[in-house]
Image (tube, rainbow, N blue to C red):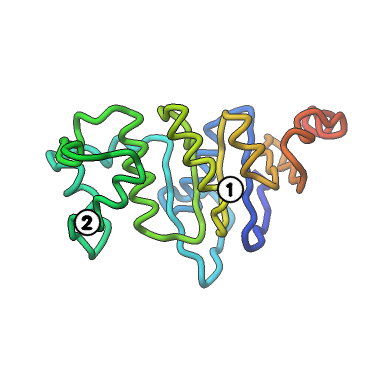
Amino acid sequence: KDVDFTAQKGEKIVFLSRDHRSMTALFEIINGHRKADSGTYHWGQTITSAYLPLDNSDFFHSKMTLFDWLCQFTKDTTELYIRGYLGRMLFAGEEIYKKVKVLSGGEKMRCMIAKMMLLDPNALILDTPTNHLDLESIQSFNNNLIRYPGNVFMSSHDHEFISSVCDRIIELTPNGIIDKLMPYDEYIVDEKIHALREN
């Protein structure tokens, strides 16, 4: 309740809360997957967004191969094009013919990231994006987000991931939000923020 913010072009915002369900609810609402009890939100006219949900299991109830699964999200279904995106997510050779229903949690997350890249959005909504990813995948994703020119709205438990990507913190509390444009490392030790949070 009492969540009110405007994101400027190129801002990368991390959302914090003592209850992770509040961030997931916010992300589901601004993606149109859940209806808010009250209030409104508006995307800018030129915004195209892509969402990486906390629970991606619904995307993988299929007998499709990884190659065919990714083809659903683009008009260009040539092997070279699709292999390029899968290769960036560390899927090589015959791996692209694996059935999506047998993929591990980390492989599913890499598929979802490949899907997002195909959509070429200028705003990303990422609900705990490092879940299930190994260190190599996290570092690669982290470096790409640092270079990414669009907006990022994310939640994460990964301290390094947050501090290297995000330049703004919005903390959801039962009585409104704490909204600060400052480095994450400073935010978590700031005594004024701590007092604000307790209030």
Q: Is residue 179 left or right of residue 80?
A: right
- Residue that sits furthest to the left in the current view: 63
**Disc 1 or disc 2, which is closer to the eye?**
2
Q: Is 20 rendered above or below residue 83? A: above
Name the amino acid, label 2.
Leu
- Judge by depth and name the residue closer to the eye, 172 or 112: 112
Determine which quarter of the picture holds residue 61: top left
On the image, the x and y values in percent for residue 15 come to: 62, 40
On the image, the x and y values in percent for residue 198 come to: 79, 27
Q: Is 17 rendered above or below residue 66? A: above
Q: Which mark is residue 41?
A: none
- Judge by depth and name the residue closer to the eye, 191 or 139: 139
Residue drawn at x 64%, y 35% as measured from the top left: 16
For the C terminus, give its image quadrant: top right
Residue drawn at x 50%, y 38% as measured from the top left: 24
Q: CA distance from mark 1 to mark 2?
A: 27 Å
Number of marks present in the image shown: 2
* SS for callout 1: helix
Work out whether mark 1 precedes mark 2 in sequence or the reverse, and give the earlier one: 2
Q: Is residue 94 left or right of residue 126?
A: left
- Residue that sits furthest to the bottom in the current view: 45
* SS for callout 2: helix
Q: Residues within 10 Å of mark 1 (few under 14, many from 20)?
A: some
User: What residue would you read off at disc 2?
Assistant: 80
User: What residue would you read off at disc 1?
Assistant: 146
Q: Are marks 1 and 2 in contact (CB under 8 Å)?
A: no
For the N terminus, give its image quadrant: top right
Determine which quarter of the picture holds residue 58: top left
- Residue that sits furthest to the right in the current view: 192
